[in-house]
Amino acid sequence: MRPEDMVGQTLGHYRIVRQVGYGGMSTVFLAEDLNLGREVAMKVFWPRPGETKDFLRRFAREARVLAQLDHPNILPVYDYGEQDGQAYLIMPYMAGGSLKDMLKVRHVLPPAEAIRLITEALNALQYAHERGLIHRDIKPANMLFKADGKLMLCDFGLVKVISADGEGRSPLDTSGETGQAITGTPEYMSPEQIRGQALPSSDIYSMGIVLYEMLTGIRPFTSNSVMSVLMKHLNELPRPLREINPGISPQLEYVVLRALERDPARRYQRPSDFLQALKQAEMPGSLPAAPADWSTKTIKNTYGSPQGAYNTVDEANMRTVISDPQVLPQAMPRPISQPGVPFQSAQESVPAAITPPGRYPQLTPQPISHPGLVQGAPAQPPAKRAGRLPLAILAVLLVLLAGLALTLVTTPLGHNLFAGQTPGTGGVTPSTKKGITPVVTTNAKGGGGTPSTNTQGMLPTQTSCPTSGTARAFVSAPLVLGNDPNIVYIVNEGTFNAPTFGTLKRYDTSTGAKIEIKKMASTRIDDAQISDDGQWVLFTVFAAGQAQLRAVRMDGQGMQTLHCAAPGSHISNAQWSIDQKWVVFDEGPDTGGASVYLLNMASGSLQTELVPPAAGLAYKPRTWLDYTRVLMIGYAPNADAQPQNVYTLDINKGANQQPGDLQQVVTQGQACWDFDSSYDSTKLFVSQCTPGQPNGSSTVGVQPATGGTLNTFFTSSTLAINTVRVIDPTNTYLLATVANTGGDTSQDGLYKLKTDGSTPLRLTSDKAGETSSLNLFSQYFWSNVSRDGSMYALETSNFSTSTYTLMVGSLNGGTPTIFASISGTVLEIAGWTKM
C-alpha cells in the first residue's frame, strides 16, 4: 500500500489525516486521536518483505523502551501498536518546525545561540546514553521545536538498544540476518557507523556535524553521490570552521573539530564531556585542548578561496541533494561534484603522451546572426534606392531567394515553421492527443538518427529568456557528421555561485584534438546530453541568476534558449526523447516537490505534465522508455530519504496528470540500487547492492518493463554494483560501476557485465580515494559508449584532492587513455557523437 492511500484510514484509535513526512523505512502522518480528540504525529514503519514477523517482535520490545523515556528535551512516545502487519508510534504533533527548517531560512546561527541549542540536544543524548540507547540518526531534521522554542530530540527510529541479551539492534536493523548494513543519514554518519559498527561516540560525531552546520551554514562533507559522501567521512578532514566563518572563536573551533575526529577513541566519549568543553569554550581566555596531533595534520584547502575571504551566506545556499532531494530535485542526474566545492579556475591538464603537441584546433564557429532580427518576424525591407539594379545583380538575387525558399521548405527549420502545430496542445492536435503514433525504427533506444547529406547554416536564434512560463520552438538545421568518435564533455570554472566560464568541449579520439563547442562567460553548466542524431547538445545552465534550458549544434552554431525558470526555481532532470520531439523536465522551488513539464520542440508549446503531490512522493524523469513513456524515480520532498521506486509516465494521458496516473513498475527503497531499460523497451535491468566490511555484495536482475517478477541473473559476494547501463541492442552486455563503502575498495572500478551471469570483465580499477561514475545526465547508450559500440567513456573523482579525470577505453579491455585531468575544475561526460 502506498502512503498516500492510507489517508482517511484508522489504525488503532487514530485516524490518519494527511502525510507530513517520509523516510526510507517509515512515513509520518498527522493523525487524530479519536479517544482524546487531539492531534498527534503517527510514524508508520514499513517492514521489508519476508521480515514482518521478526520486525514486529523486536519493534514491540524496543517501543516499550522508547515509551519509558522521560526527559524535557526528548519527544515522548504516547503510544505504539500493530495492525495488519504495520507497526506505528504515536507522538506529540510539533507544528513549530525543525532545526533543519530554521537553517534553511537563517543559514548560520550566532555561536551563543548554536551552543544553547546543541546544549539541549546533548542533555537529551546524555539521558539516552545513560539508558543504553544509541540514537544513530542525529541530524537537524530530528530536532524539533516546541511553541516556547525548546528543542526536542526525536525520531529514535534507528535507535540501537544495548540490551542484556547482547542483541544491540534497532527494530529496523536487519543486519543480523543479511550481514552488516549501513543505517543513518550519510551527511551525519560517523566513519565507524558507515562500517556498521555504531558506538555511543558515533552520536557525538553526528552532534559535531550538526554544530558545524549551525556555525558555518554548510555540512563538512557533501556531494551529489551517496557513495562519495561516505568516502569523505572515511578519508577526509573537515575544513576548519574559521576559514568559513572568521567570527567563530579558536576555542569553539577546537571543540567542534575534536567531536569530528575520525578515530572514535579521540572524540569526547560522553555527551556531557562535549557539553563541558563547550561551556569552557565560552569562557574568556580559556582554550580547550585541541584534538590530538591536530596541528600536525595537513588540511588541504580544496575550496580555492583565501582564508577569511569566504562568503558564508553563499556557501549556505549550496545544498546537497543526497539527503535533501527537495533542495535541488535533480539529485541523481546532477554532476558528481558537490555543491560547496567551487570550480577552481585552472588550465586543463592533458598528459603529453595522450594528445600530441600542437593539435588543439580551437574551432568556435559563430552562428549566422543578424542583430535586431526577431525570431519569427520578417526582416525589414531594404530602403529604396534611386535608379534600377543592374539586371545581372537582380538575377543573382532571384537565384539566392529561390535557394532560400527551397531551404525553408526542405529542412527541419521549414517543417517547424510551416507544419501548422496546434498551440497549447504540445504540438499534438486534439484528435491525436490520446493516441500518439510512434515512428517505427529498428529499436526504441535510437541509434544515430537519419544522417544529413549537407550542412546548412543556422538562421538567427534567440538566447534571451522567453516570456515567463513559456518556451520557444527549437530551431535546427542539419549538420553533416564525420566518422571519428568524439566525446562531448563539460568544463566548469570558477565557484559554484560565481562561475567564470562554462564550456562544452569535445575530444576527438582519433586525432587527440580538443575543440570548444561553446564557451560561456559567467555561466555554470548543470547538465548536458547529446541528441539521437548526434548533431545537438541539450543542456541546462545557471546564468544571470536563472536556470535556463538551452541547445547548441555540435559545431557551435545555433545556440538558443528554449525556456527559463522563474527566479528561485530550478530546472532539473531534463530528458530529450529519442525521436527528438519532446523534452520532459522538472521545475520547482528549493523546497517541495517539483512539477514535471513537457516541451514540444517543434512548436515551443509547454504544458504541466505531472502536478506535484500535496504530500507523499514527488517524481523526477530518468529516461524515456520509448517515444511516449518516461521512466520516473520517486523521491520524498522535505525528507532525508533515498530515491525509491520506478514509475512510468505516459504522455498520451495528456496534461496535468496526478501521481495516481503513473504506473509503478519497480519497488525499491534501499540506499544502493540502479536500473536501465532494454533497447526494445520491453525489459528493465535492476541492480541492488549492500556495501560492507570487508566486501560488498550485489545482485542484478531483469524484469518486464511494465512491472513483474525480477529474475536475478548475477550475484556477487565481493562486488558492490551501484550503477548499471545497457550498451548493446541484444541486451547481452551491461556496463556496471562498483563502489564498496567502508570496506575493501580494491575491487572498485568499471566492469563489463554479461547478462548470462558469467564472470564480468574488469575494465578499470579505482585508485585510492577515487570514485568512478558513468554518465550522470542520460541513460541512452551513446551517453556512455561510442556510436559504433567499441569504446566507453568514464569519469572519476578524487574528493580528497578535488581532482576530476576523464578517460576513454576499449570495451574489450586494456589500459584506458586519460584525456583530461584537473584539480578543482569540474569535468563531466555529456555523451558521444561523430565528427
Image (cartoon, rainbow, N blue to C red):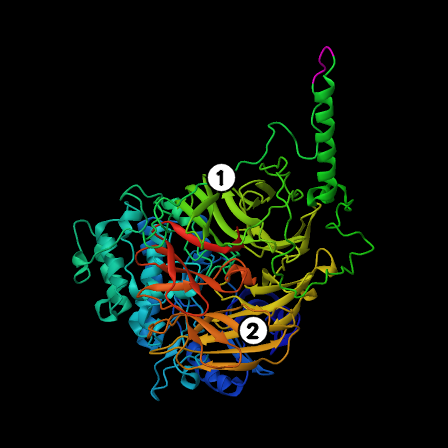
Secondary structure found at label 2: strand
- Look at the image and tell me whether residue 277 can be seen: yes
Q: Position of residue 47 (x, y in %)?
A: 53, 80
Q: Residue furthest top?
A: 386
- Residue 412 falls in which quadrant of the image? top right
Q: Residues within 10 Å of mark 1 (few under 14, many from 20)?
A: some
Secondary structure type for disc 1: loop
* Disc 2 residue crowd, few under 14, some 14–19, many 20+, Cα 10 Å: many
C-alpha span from label 2 to label 1: 40 Å
In the picture of the structure, the residue carrying the numbered disc 1 is: 364
Q: Residue furthest bottom?
A: 165
Q: Which residues are magenta?
A: 383-387
Q: Position of residue 720 (x, y in %)?
A: 42, 75
Q: As rendered, which of 509 and 806 lies closer to the eye?
A: 509
Going 24% across and 49% down the picture, which residue do you hit?
249
Tell us which disc is closer to us: 2 or 1.
Answer: 1
Determine which of the numbered discs, if any, sits on residue 685 in the image. Answer: 2
273 horizontally vs 92: left or right: left
Q: Nearer the viewer, residue 788 or 65?
A: 788
